[in-house]
Amino acid sequence: MKGSDFSKLIKTRLTFMVTFSASISFIIAVKANGGNTWGALYSTTMWMNWVKLVVGGFLVTSAANCFNEVIEVRFDRLMKRTMDRPMPAGRMTTGQGLVLGMGMGILGTYLLGSLNLLTGLLSVFSIVLYAFAYTPLKRVNGFIAVFVGAIPGALPALIGYVAGQPHGRIDQIAIILFMIQFVWQFVHFWAIAWVLDDDYKLAGFRLLPTAKRDKTSALITFVFAVVLVPVSLLPTIYGYGGYYVGGVSLLMSLIFLYQAFNLLRTLEVKAARTLMFGSFYYLPIVQLMFLFDFIAK
């Protein structure tokens, strides 16, 4: 198997985004636990734990993606964007994919579990929910599938935070980090689904809220973009961030909202593509601002 095949198998860009999100939450957790974060960055223990989180998170996410492709291999053969992945293209068997996925999942869970028990349990829950609940639901109902998929999609923020706590606990900051990423998932998923709807239909996937590009699907996407505005302000509302994170989050949310409104107004693939790319920028910027503002307090 070539390196490019492995990259397609584990969905490298998606996996990188997930690991990045967990890393940000990890550093926030260290600060929340009373640590001088910048001073703690010179701590060997923190760096070792950070490496465990990054490597473990990368492996767990890769395993979930691998299981997803094992289950969907016959459908991936039908879609233009997935037919060249190693399993549908015949360069890897599903048995090989399953063994590789199990190996990555076990090693990743072990690394995350070595940080604390809850981190390990959340990683297992994330794999199971993504591969064995979200994956089959994609052919049943777009709204339910995205709701279920948004949970493992937002869990990296929670896992990273819990990993940064010595005894692993979920507090108000952890819930805020999870909620921002959870609500963002809906707009992100549906923008992608709108762009790729023709390809998805070839495999029988129904990921738009009404299963088609219509006004109602665009309206539901817009409503979640509206909900994201106050959710993005939760760090400031609860005093974990100041005006900087509040201002940037509000600005990014309003830009995101405008892009969702433009989709509602035009119902065009071009507008959905703009919204999709906007989602790629939105989350890392908001998370990084939360990190820098929280540390500066």
Image (cartoon, rainbow, N blue to C red):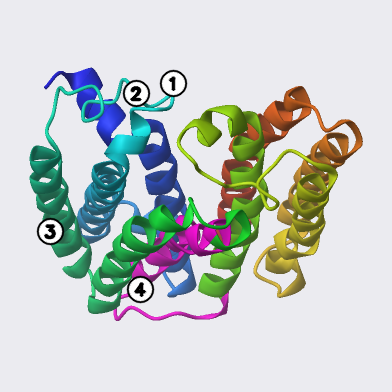
At x 15%, y 22%, the residue is: 91
Reading the image, the residue beneath label 3 is 106
Q: Would you say the magenta stretch is mainly helix, strand or loop?
A: helix
Res 83 label: 2
Marks 2 and 1: in contact by CB < 8 Å? yes
Left or right placement of residue 33 versus residue 199 in this view: left
The image quarter containing residue 158 is bottom left
Q: Does the CB distance between marks 2 and 4 fall below 8 Å?
A: no
**Residue matched to label 1:** 80
What residue is at 76 percent from the left and 71 percent from the top? 237
Q: Quadrant of the C terminus?
A: bottom right
Mark 3 or mark 2, which is nearer the start of the sequence? 2
Whole-number angstrom distance, CA of label 2 to CA of label 4: 42 Å
Q: Secondary structure at mark 1?
A: loop
Q: Secondary structure at mark 4?
A: loop
Report the residue at 27% width, 59% height from top.
Answer: 46
Residue sitting nearer the eye, 47 or 260: 260
Mark 4 burial class by Cα count in 10 Å: few <14, some 14-19, many 20+: many
What residue sits right under mark 4 in the picture?
A: 165
Q: Residues within 10 Å of mark 1 (few under 14, many from 20)?
A: few
Amino acid type, residue under disc 4 in the picture: Gln
The residue stretch that appears in magenta: 145-172
